Amino acid sequence: DFSSQAYDYTNLLPQNQQLLGQVCSLVGQGKQVLDAGCGSANLSVLLARNNDVVAYDYNKSMLDIAREKARPLRNVKIRHGDVMRLRFRDNSFDAYASVNVLYHLADPSKAIKEANRVLRSQGVLVITSTLKGAGMDPEFMHKVHEDAKQVNMDEEKLALLAQFNKTLFEDGGMKFTPTMQEMEQMLKNHGFRISSSERAYYDMNFLIKAFKE
């Protein structure tokens, strides 16, 4: 599957590794964590070093890759489902993490509402996705190429990665790209208190930590 292959090559980029590390740091340790829209479980595997994780995604080909990665880990459970209709009871998790999922969603507010529902009181939400105005400008593509060379990514993988990014940025692949203020307001509207917010991943993403009130 093209998208799951190319998506996984993104994980080779140092900037992506840094982003996932930031998310893990903000989530903390010793928690029951939902990785909502886990993709191929790159974040889930990292979170599982210090937490129990449920890796949850709608894309079954992504979940096939996720299962292989998580096979050696007893504290990662793979589940199939829609982040806008989570298949979990209220107050099920201590933490909710979501990386580059919101831009796929026609109604991201439903996902935020569901995040609040399944989190326990004072549960932590860590969420990152693409900001308004981000795009495939030459400077961004140059940085990606430099990062790819740094990790010796071969030309075929780099071409697939470029095609994947083009599909997202230029071919209508991104349905929701808020400003930082708009994202913070959405979280506040759904019962979250903002703890920190910053730009991440080539300055193209918001990265927000919030607590359930």
Image: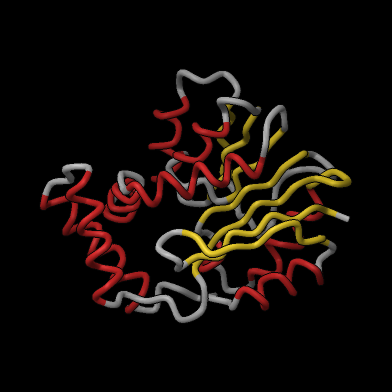
Q: Is residue 19 left or right of residue 35?
A: left
From the top left corner, tell me how far across and down residue 184 is, in percent: 71, 70
Picture residue at 67% right of the left edge, 77% below the top = 181
Above or below, 87 against 107 in this view is above
Residue in the foreground of this view, choosing between 147 and 134: 147
From the top left corner, tell me how far across and down residue 44 is, in percent: 53, 36
Residue in the foreground of this view, choosing between 161 and 28: 28
Picture residue at 18% right of the left edge, 45% below the top = 153
Q: Is residue 190 left or right of residue 208?
A: right
Q: Quadrant of residue 50?
A: top right
Picture residue at 71% right of the left edge, 46% below the top = 87
In what quadrant of the picture does the C terminus appear?
A: bottom right
Residue in the foreground of this view, choosing between 212 and 171: 212
Picture residue at 79% right of the left edge, 47% below the top = 118
From the top left corner, tell me how far across and down residue 120 is, in percent: 85, 43
Q: Is residue 127 left or right of residue 121?
A: left
From the top left corner, tell me how far across and down residue 182 is, in percent: 67, 78
Q: How is the structure coloured here?
A: secondary structure
Above or below, 203 against 120 in this view is below
Q: Is residue 97 left or right of residue 204?
A: right
Q: Quadrant of residue 49?
A: top right
Above or below, 213 against 142 in this view is above
